[in-house]
Image (cartoon, rainbow, N blue to C red):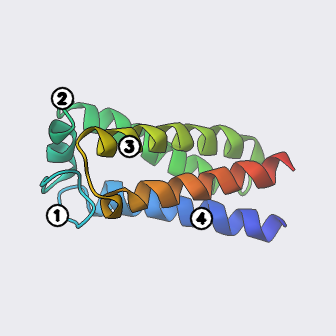
Amino acid sequence: MQTLIYVLQIAAALGLLNVWLLRFNQRTAYRGGSAGSMREEFVTYGLPGWFAYVIGTLKVGSAIALIVGIWMPVLVLPAAGLISVLMLGALSMHIKIHDPLKKMLPALGMLALCLGIIWVVLR
């Protein structure tokens, strides 16, 4: 069971780090509306562009906490919980602008990963 939680932690962390550090300024098929970057995506949702950096800091910090959580398990539950809340927020933004389900899949997948982590930790 411990191996499963490590795999989930690393998958979630690498997914977040990929989106927020490597693809932040890149166009992807999953950006909200017709946004070409993360900052534009937040503006598309009706949020100020600077808010992308606040959310990004929370997500990158949580991703790092998931990785460090392999050695410091006390970090895992709060990190997975915060990411879950942030993913619910992401889904609500996609719904707000009437994005198709396809654009919501990364947030749904990350939410499922983090809920899986929470479930395994609390078992």
**Sequence-earlier tag: 1 or 2:** 1
**Sequence-earlier tag: 4 or 2:** 4
Q: Does residue 101 sit above or below 56 in this rendering?
A: below
Mark 4–mark 3 distance (CA, rounded to whole Å): 21 Å
| Dot 3 amino acid type | Ala
Please state which of the two labelled residues, at mark 3 or mark 2, is closer to the viewer: 3
Residue 80 is left or right of residue 83, and the answer is right
* Residue under numbered circle 3: 90
| Quarter of the image with the N terminus in it | bottom right
* Residue under numbered circle 4: 10
**Sequence-earlier tag: 4 or 1:** 4
Disc 1 element: loop
Q: How crowded is mark 3: few (under 14 residues within 10 Å), some or many (20 or more)?
A: many
**Sequence-earlier tag: 4 or 3:** 4
Res. 27 mark: 1
Residue 69 in view of the camera: no
**Depth order, front residue of 121/94:** 94
Asked if the residue at tag 3 contacts the one at tag 4, i.e. Cβ–Cβ closer than 8 Å, the answer is no
Q: What residue appears at the point 35 percent right and 42 percent down from the top-left corner?
A: 56
Q: Does residue 60 sit above or below 58 in this rendering?
A: below
**Sequence-earlier tag: 1 or 3:** 1
Residue 19 in view of the camera: yes
**Sequence-earlier tag: 3 or 2:** 2
Instruction: State which quadrant residue 92 falls in.
Output: top left
Please state which of the two labelled residues, at mark 4 or mark 3, is closer to the viewer: 3
Disc 2 element: loop
Instruction: State which quadrant residue 20 falls in.
Output: bottom left
* Residue under numbered circle 2: 48
Q: What residue appears at the point 41 percent right and 60 percent down from the top-left corner?
A: 106
Q: What residue appears at the point 44 percent right and 47 percent down from the top-left corner?
A: 60
Asked if the residue at tag 2 contacts the one at tag 4, i.e. Cβ–Cβ closer than 8 Å, the answer is no
| Dot 2 amino acid type | Pro
